Structures are given as structure tokens and as C-alpha cells.
Amino acid sequence: MQLIVENYILFGNGLAWTFGLAVLTLVFATVISLFVGIMSITRNRLLTVAARIYVEVFRDIPLLVSLFFIYFGAPLIGLPLDPFSAAVVTLSLWGGANGAEIVRGGFNAIPEHQRTSAAALGLKPWQIYWYVIAPQALLPIIPPFTGLFTLLVQSTSLAALIGVPELFRMAQIVVERTTIMEGYSPAFTIFGAILVVYYLISAALNALTSRLERAMQHRLKARGAADMGSVRRQAEESV
Amino acid sequence: MTACASNRAVPLIAAEGLTKCFAKHTALRAVSLSVARGEVVAVIGPSGSGKSTLIRCLNGLLVPDAGTIRIDGAPVDMRQQRAWRAVRLRVGMVFQDCSLFPHLSVLQNITLAPVRTGRMRREQAAETARNLLARVQLADKADAYPAQLSGGQLQRVAIVRALAMAPEALLLDEPTSALDPEMIAEVLDVLRTLSREGMTMVIVTHEIGFAREAASRVIFMDQAEIVEQGAADAVLTAPREARTRTFLDKIL
Ligand SMILES: Nc1ncnc2c1ncn2[C@@H]1O[C@H](COP(=O)(O)OP(=O)(O)O)[C@@H](O)[C@H]1O
Ligand SMILES: [Mg+2]
């Protein structure tokens, strides 16, 4: 406990880096998810194939390998990235690939006759998506999306391995320094404390999710929409 | 309306040589069909004979591979989605499966298209919708959501949704086939009223009794072609073609 208090500046800084990483990553990952997810449901073959390749590449390679590849590979193509940027780029791309699959699942779960009957009313394609398809597709994917968010927040700790001074890296530094200077290892205590912090962040995010989910279910129940559950299941299966 | 009344000879919908293939399967083979204003055309035939394909080709939900379509004498440029949208504003459609939007209330389902296509202002559309709902005995369901309605009620709302666009004709693809028997009557009643009021309709149906009494013309389709057509009584009571007879014997 004393160690944490003594090193509060270090830990505070670490936490700030972690939050920075998390917030930027969540924003970029969401934007990429929507963009690529919608790309993959268009009828343009070029767009769908491009989306497919991107999603498969990032989902099939371990996150850590992608992180190293981007951090050490970027300078080779004349684009040196500092550790923080490399981490944001990698986590966003990885989150975007997984999020795109959730978005695609949400859209695919909407029966074809919804599009057809909207078209039969003389609506334009963008109106069909905006007023008819998107509202039905996006509400049920909020819960699986928040699951992805939690995963992303936890994955920010991987950034320690390329030297981002975030929370986990700070903990490593304090443990190493104390071991050398004081002659004993506080690893258990320090990492225990870190574990609690990550747990609290995730728990807060989850609490937010279930609130959102309850509010949503309440709204859907008020509307008596029975088949939303299946949309959500399908969206979750695609993760 | 006045322009067309002056030229009754021009059919409202005139399709010539419509052909539609899926992969190597031909679902529609050079079918021609002409529908005059106020006419009610019933399309009957076995499952898979191309009935749905035919009426979906009439408003571009399926784009025909060959043939021409004229609406009120004006040819439709079939490669242009914009041209098809113009057709759909004039020719409404009702489907077999409940195709209402589950996230919108009954009223919103009905007013969405009139408002978004710029036909009506929101208040005007809502008023039209409420009047039409009252006509199908659903005035009290304006704020309900589709999941709260029975199949027959859903289908009546779907008809009202199409009517709210003030179409000149309606295409209906088996509007009662997915309904429980006790609900079929309430939907057919609405269609009968529409036909009496002079609404032009092309209706795919297995309700032979309804076709006999409400349709001015019956078309029998089999294997991607129109086999026989004529006055309802003639085709249904004394069919000329053996295939029509076989089909009628089977379903009656
Ligand atoms: N989207 C499609 N893709 C492939 N084949 C289709 C499609 N739609 C219809 N068909 C085929 O075209 C034929 C006619 O179908 P349809 O017009 O739906 O018949 P009906 O409405 O008379 O039952 C059937 O053999 C059907 O399998
Ligand atoms: Mg059919």
C-alpha cells in the first residue's frame, strides 16, 4: 500500500496513459466498425472484398503479433510510429475488425423483406437504410459492442510490451525498481492492485452496458418487438 | 386523373414480353399483361409458376431481363432505379408476409413514406393515415406496434400503408396466404371494398371465391407463362386449357 502511495505520480501517469489509449481506441474502433461493417453489406463487390480481407487479417492474427508488426514494421515503410501511436493504431484496427463483424451481423439479421417493402414504398436506398434498416440493426448490437469495448480496455495493457508508460508498464517498473533497491519483490501486491484497477474499469463499463441494455429492453418491450432477441443473438454469434 | 379519364384506351399498366431468369432457370417467359384503370386482375397458378416474379417485375423489385413496361402509356426506363421509384410512387404493393417495420408504430409505418418521399407534410400524412385506419376498423391501433397486432390487423395496416401514398394501382402478392382462416375474411372485405371503389388491382391469390366475385379478369399462370386469361367466370367455371382445369380441380 505504501509503495502505491509513494509512487502515486507514476501510477497516476500510468492511469492517464491507459485512459488516453482506451478512449482514443474506443472512438476509432467504433468509427472503423461502422464504416467497414457498412462497407461489407453494400452490393459493391470491391468494397465487400476489401472489408472481408481487412477483417480476416486482423481477426486471424494474435493482437500482440499485430502490435509488434505495426510498431516495428512502420519505420520500414518510412512511417516511424511512437509506441503510443502504434498501440492506438493496432488496437483500433483490431477493434474495428471485430466491431465490423458485429455491425455486419446486426444488419444481416434484418430480414430481406424489410428492405423490399420499404423499396416498394418508393423510398430511396439511403432512406431505406436510415429509417428502416439501421434503427433495427443498431439497437441490438449495443450489448455485444460493449463487450468488445471491455476487451479493448483490457487489451491496452499489451501496449506495455512496446514501451508505452501506461498503468501496467508502471507497475512493472515499480516492481523491478523495488526488487533491485530494497531487495524484495512486491510483485504480488502491486500486480494485485493493478488487477483491481482493471477490474474496476471493466466493471464500470459493464454496469453501464447492463443499464443501457435494460433501458433498451424496456423500450423494445414497450413496443412489443418480439424478434429483437434473435437479432441480438445473431449479432453476438458473429463476434 | 383527368388526363387519364380522357384517354381510357391507354392501359394503366402495360407489360410486353417480360422475361426474367434466375441463373439458368426461367421464372418468366415473354409474358405480356395489360391492366386498365379500375380493373381487378386476379393471378392464379401453382406454386413456382412465376406469379410473384411477374408482379415484382411490374414495379422493379425485380428488374426484367427483357420486355417493356408502360405506365399510363409512358415507357419505363428499366435500367434506372429512379424510374422504378417513380413507378412505385404510383403503384403500391402489399406482400404476403407481414412486412411492417417492427420498430415503428402503426401510424409511423403508414406516414413514413408519404412524408419522406415528399408527398405530404407530417400533419397531413397523419390525418390521412388516421382516416384510412378508421376505414379498416383500426382507428384505435394507430399508436400500437406491429408485434401487438394479429395477422389480419397487420395485413390491413399494410394495405393502408400502401393506400396512404394515394397510388393509382395496387399490386398484392398473396395477401391472405399467411393468415389464419378466421382472419382471411377481414382482409378480403377490405379488398372487396377497394375494388368496388374502382381501385386498380393486380392480386395474386388462391382465394378462388374472392377472384370469382371481385376480379374482372383472371389470369392462370403455369411454368413461367400465362396459360389462359379471361373473364373470371369463364376461366374459373369453364376453363379452355387442360392445365387450368387440372389446377382448379386440385385446389377446389
Ligand atoms: N430470387 C430468386 N432466385 C432464384 N430463383 C428464384 C428467385 N425467385 C423465384 N425463383 C424461382 O422462380 C420460379 C418462380 O417463382 P415465383 O415467381 O416466386 O413463383 P410463385 O409466386 O408463382 O410461387 C420458382 O421456380 C422459383 O424457385
Ligand atoms: Mg409467390
Image (spheres, coloured by chain):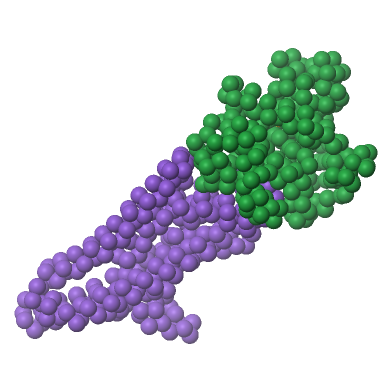
Chain colours: A purple, B green
Residue B150 at x, y percent in the picture: 54, 31
Residue at the outermost left position: A183
Residue B92 appears in the rendering: yes
Horizontal and vertical percent for residue B66? 83, 45
| Number of numbered discs visible in the structure rendering | 0
Identify the image quadrant of the C terminus of chain B. Answer: top right
Residue A20 on image: x %, y %: 34, 75
**Residue A126 placement: quadrant:** bottom right
User: Is B222 rendered above or below residue A74?
Assistant: above
Give the answer, above or below, for where B61 lies relative to B156.
Answer: below
In this view, B148 is above or below A89: above
**In the image shown, does A222 or B32 lie closer to the viewer?**
A222
Position of residue A1 in the picture relative to residue A113 (left or right): left
Q: Is residue B44 above or below residue B134?
A: above
**Nearest to the observer: residue B160 or residue A56:** B160
Question: Is residue A224 left or right of B221 when viewed as pictured?
Answer: left
- Tell me which residue sits at (36%, 71%) in the image: A23
On the question of residue B84 being in view, the answer is no
Left or right of B4? Residue A158 is: left
- Splitting the image into 4 quarters, where does residue B205 fall? top right
Q: Position of residue A166 (x, y in %)?
A: 27, 76
Q: Residue visible at 34% across and 56% down? A: A209
- Quadrant location of the N terminus of chain B? top right
Q: Residue, x 82% and y 22% (percent of image)?
A: B232
Query: With B16 as the anchor, is A208 left or right in this view?
Result: left
Residue at 35% x, 80% y is A83
